[in-house]
Amino acid sequence: MRGRNFSMYRLFWKLFLSFWLALVVFAGGAVFAVSAYLDHAKAKQELRGREDGFRGMVVAAQLAADEKGYPGLLDWLRERDEDQLVPLLLLDRDGRDALGREVSAGVLARLQRHQQSAREGQPDARIPITLADGRHYWLMPDLQGASLSRLVARPKVIALQVLLAALSGGAVCFVLAWYLIAPIERLRKTAALYGAGDFRHRVGPSLGRRRDEIVDLAYAMDSMAERIGNLIQSQHTLLRDVSHELRSPLARAQAAVGVARQQAGEVADAEFDRIEMEMDRLNELIGQILSYYRLDAGQRPTAAEIQEFRLDELVAEVVEENQALAAEKQCAIGFRSAPAPSPFAGSEALLYSAFTNVVHNAVRHSPPGGRIEVALDRAEGEWKIEIDDQGPGIDPGLLERVFEPFVRADASRAKNTGGFGLGLAIAKRAVEYHGGHIAARNRAGGGLAMVMHLPVAR
Amino acid sequence: MPHLLLADDDHDFCALLERYLKIEGFDIALAHDGETALALALSGNFDLIVLDIMMPGISGLEVLRRLRPLCRTPVLMLTALGEDADSLRGFELGADDYLGKPCNLKVLLARIRAVLRRSEQVAAGCVDDGVQICVDDLSVNTHSLAVKCRERPVDLTSTEFAILESLLRSAGQVVAKAALSEKALRRPLGRFDRSLDMHISNLRQKLGPLPNGNERIKTIRGVGYQYLTE
C-alpha cells in the first residue's frame, strides 16, 4: 500500500465528498426551514415561552436606555440585530423604527393592539421602554423578517448546527464510501495476483453474503481465473507429457544410430556425428523443458539435492568454464568477488545452471572483442551477482518477458546464436527457488546487465 | 565373455542394445519387467546388470532393493532424463553407477566396461602389494573380498569395496575426489555427479564410527575424503 497516494482512492474520495456536500446542503436547508417554520408557528400562537424570553429582551433594552440614554439603546439594538435571526424593531408611538427599517402592516397592527390594551389597562399589555425624557418605544419582533438572506449574513447564528450536521453526515458518507470501495480493493489485489501468474486465488467467497454488482464482478473474475488457470495448466501438462513421451523414441533412435555406426565402420562418420549432435540437442531441449516445468510446478528438489557450497567458487568455476566459449568470439570474461568465506546452502546444480545460462547469454550477445564483467557482492542479507555485457541490450518492452519460456530478445538472430529460449526462464525459476529474484536492465553505457539477488538465509 | 542382464521394458530398445553389445563381445540376457529381472538376476550368474528404473510391475529400484541383500552383482541403473532424485535413491540402495536415458551407446559401453573392470579387479584381488589391509578395527582382504569391522563381517558392493580400498591405502591422508573417482569408479567425475558422495554415505552407514566414537570417513569440502585413524 505504501507509495500509493490519494489518486488510487479517486473514486472513493469522489463518492465521499459528493455525498458529504449533498448532506451538508440538505442539512443546512433543513435546519433553516425547520427554524423558520417554528418561528412562524410561534408567532401565530404567541407561545408563552417565547413571550417570556421576549420580556427579558425588553428588560435588557430598558436597562441599556437607563444607563446610556437613547444612544445606548440604539447600540444595544444594533448588537441584537447582529446576533438574532428574527429582526427586533424599536418603534415609536407612530410606528417608525428607530433604525429606519421598514415596518410591515402586520407589525403596525400588533403595535396598535398593544397600545390599545395598554390604554385599557389590561394586565398582559406590553410595557414600552421609557426614556429619561419620557418618550416611549415599543420593542417588536418582526417574525416575517427572518429571511434566508438575513441568515446568510449572520452565519454565527446556526454555525454549530450546520457543523454538527456536516460531521455526522460525513461519518455516514465515509462508511458508505468505504463499503463501496473495500471490495474493489480486494478485486485489485486479486487481479495483481493473477497478473503475477497465480491463478489459484478466489475473491468471490471472501466478500461474504454481500450481493451487488461488485460481487457479481468478483465471481466473474473467479470463473475467468479458473478458466485461464486450467488452460495454462493443461498447456504445461501437454508440453511436459510430450517431452516425457519423446524420450523413448529418442532413446531408440540413439541406440539405432549406435548400432548403425558400429556396422558401417568409418563410412559416413561425419553424417553420424551430425545425427548424434542433433539428437543431443533434442535431448538437451527435452531436459530443459522437463527441468523448467519441474521448477514451475513448484516441485522442490529433494533434501539430497541441497548441499552447502561456496558461492564464489561456483561463480568462478562457471566463469572459467566459459572462457573458452568467449575466446571463440575474441571476448573475455572478467570476474570480481567480494570475500565469501561462509558457505551457501542450496542446490548447487540449479544455481550452476542458472549462472551458466546467464553467462552463456551474455557471451552469445557480446560483439566480437567485447568484455563481460561478472561481479559477486555481499549486500544486506543477500548475495548479488551481476553479469554485464557490451551487447545490443534488449528492447525495454521485453526486459521482463525474456524470463518467460521461449521468449527471445532477438527473434532474427535466435537460430544463429543457439539456445532454445529456455535458459533465462530456467535461471529465473532456479533463483526464485532459492528465495531470490533476477532482473535485466539496459546499462547506461550500452549493453545488458543481469542482476541476481540470493538471500543468505531463509 | 562377460555375461550381462539387460532389464528394460522397451523391447525395441533392448533388441538394439543387445545387438550392439553382442558385437562388442558381451553375452546378453533380456528381461522386460521387474519380476523377470529379479528372478533372472538371482538365478543367473551375471557379471553386470543394466537396470532401467521405469518398468511395469515392480520398478527397477524395487528390484535393486530386493536383490542387494542376496547378491552383489554390479548394477548400472538407467534413469529417465530429468529424474535425478531416482538416481540418488538408486545409490542408497546399492547401485554401482547410473546413466541418464536417452544416452549415447558409446558412453553406455564405457560405463559398463568401467564397472566391470572395477569389479574384476576387486574379484581378482589383483592388487600386487599384500592381501590383507588392517587399520584399527577394520580388516579388508583384497583376495577374498571379506571386510570385517570389529570382527563382524560387512557386506559391500564391489564399487564400495573399491572406494574403501583406495581410502584405506591412503589412510590418514586426504584423497582428492577426482583421483578417487578415477581409481575406484574408473571414470572421471562429472561436475554434479554425486555418485561418489552416495557411495561414501553408504560406506559410513555400513561401517559405523571408529571405536573411539569419531567418524570414520571425513569429508574435506571442495577437496575429497579422508579415512581417519585413531
Image (spheres, helix red, strand yellow):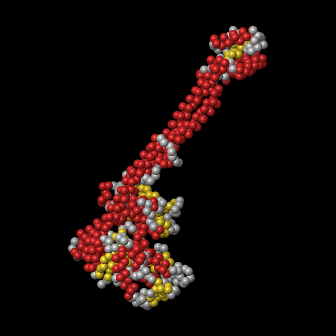
Residue A35 x/y as whole percent: 63, 24
Quadrant in the picture for residue A33: top right
Give coordinates of residue A306: x percent, y percent. Answer: 47, 68
The quarter in which the N terminus of chain B is drawn is: bottom left
Res. B8 image quadrant: bottom left
Measuring from the top left, give residue A101's x and y in whole percent: 64, 14
The residue shown at (43%, 80%) is B69
Q: How many marks?
A: 0
Residue A128 appears in the rendering: no
Q: Position of residue A31 (x, y in %)?
A: 61, 27
Q: Residue at x 44, y 75 (%)?
A: B92
- Looking at the image, residue A43 sits to the left or right of residue A11; the answer is right
Left of A121 or right of it: where is A444?
left
Q: In which quarter of the view is residue A352 placed?
A: bottom left
Q: Residue at x 47, y 42 (%)?
A: A214
Q: Residue at x 65, y 17 (%)?
A: A44
Relative to the observer, which residue lies in front, B35 or A357?
Answer: B35
Q: Quadrant of the C terminus of chain B?
A: bottom right
On the rendered structure, is A138 left or right of A292? right
Closest to the observer: B124 or A209? A209
